[in-house]
Amino acid sequence: MNVAIAGAGVIGSAIAYYLSLRGVAATVIERHRVAGAASGKSGGFLARDWCTGQAQDGLARLSFDLHTDLSTALDAEYGYRRVDTYAVSVSERRSLKGSGEGLASDWISDECAVHQQLGDQSSTAQLIPDLFTHALLDQALVNGALLIQGEVTGVVCDAGAGRLSAVEVNGERIDADALVIAMGPWSVLAAQWMSLPAVYGLKSPSITLAAGTTTASEVLFLDYEDEHGKRHDPELVPRADGEYYICGFSDDAPLPVAPEHVSADEAQCDRLQAVAAHVAAELGEATVSRRQACYRPICEDAMPVMGAVAGLEGAYVATAHNCWGMLNAPATGFVMAELIADGVSSELDLSAFAPARLPAFSF
């Protein structure tokens, strides 16, 4: 069996990895670069129980546990660690000194207010997304998977059988028993060849700050009041390599036709730098090492789109994980590998994520 996977982000890489553990040949096809979109520019925050009451709760819990397993199974360092997580208020208009609690490590400004602990080291963790994505794919390649630079532009079906037999890549045919669409928000392009729901992109700017070696291990979810009194919800993530990642101010800017055309909004990045400076004086003096943006894939009901594609045997999709792509990648890879190889997932009921639950998109 040979499985073609369109997309070398964290979802496609995880599927390739778990297929490789089963001895199933996988060919990963990437038109840009490995982890070149959201999988290389997200925060890498992981939470075990933040989807309680939602259809993806089981997916999140399984995936959080798989992250623990992968931290020892993968022969790579990607900054995985358990963290404490807090809700913190910050204001440009007024001091919040004395209105909240402090952190044990006391690295944030006393002008901020810590209001609530959202998670501890039993339930929240983090990693460096691009390194994790590469670790998954690198191990899959060691196990026998292939990586091809190119763009999937169509599918070939057996005459009259309604079954996929090959994919078209750069004008050439690659034989395949199955194809998984895992192209993030660009998965919608595959609706030209199969029945898929609309997948959109939500643009999220971010920066990383090189503040030197740090022992800070608290992730902060901010309630940020700007000078006009408007509230925002940036996220600040200190990383194990000494960098700080901060994101926020998402918008619905149109999705570019290709990931290499995504660009950062300098004004938004400047705003994020100003937010960081209000949280900690050290960050106000830090060098901005990256200014970037990515598009988080999301669909109409904000649930993942995962499973077999109706009307074309051998076609599958795994996308629309929104802000939980890095968290849910291992479980997605695990259950999709089961579905492709065995015809069913034994770990999770995937019906809530079925592509056919939503109207098919047409160009």
Image (cartoon, rainbow, N blue to C red):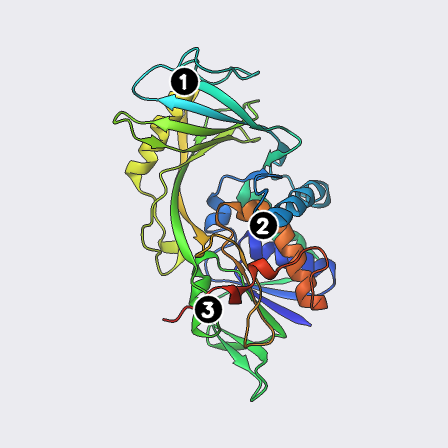
Number of residues whose C-alpha sits closer than 10 Å to that of mark 1, classed few (under 14), some (14–19) or many (20 or more): few
The residue closer to the viewer here, 356 or 297, is 356
Return the disc, 2 or 3, that comes first in the chain's sequence. Answer: 2
The residue closer to the viewer here, 222 or 7, is 222
Q: Quadrant of the C terminus?
A: bottom left
Residue under label 2, please give it. Answer: 56
Residue under label 1, please give it. Answer: 281
Q: CA distance from mark 1 to mark 2?
A: 38 Å
What amino acid type is highlighted by mark number 1?
Ala
Q: Residue furthest bottom?
A: 160
The residue depicted at 34 percent of the width and 44 percent of the height is 264
Q: CA distance from mark 1 to mark 3?
A: 47 Å
Return the disc, 1 or 3, that comes first in the chain's sequence. Answer: 3
The residue depicted at 32 percent of the width and 16 percent of the height is 94
Residue under label 3, please give it. Answer: 190
Number of residues whose C-alpha sits closer than 10 Å to that of mark 2, classed few (under 14), some (14–19) or many (20 or more): many
The residue depicted at 61 percent of the width and 72 percent of the height is 178
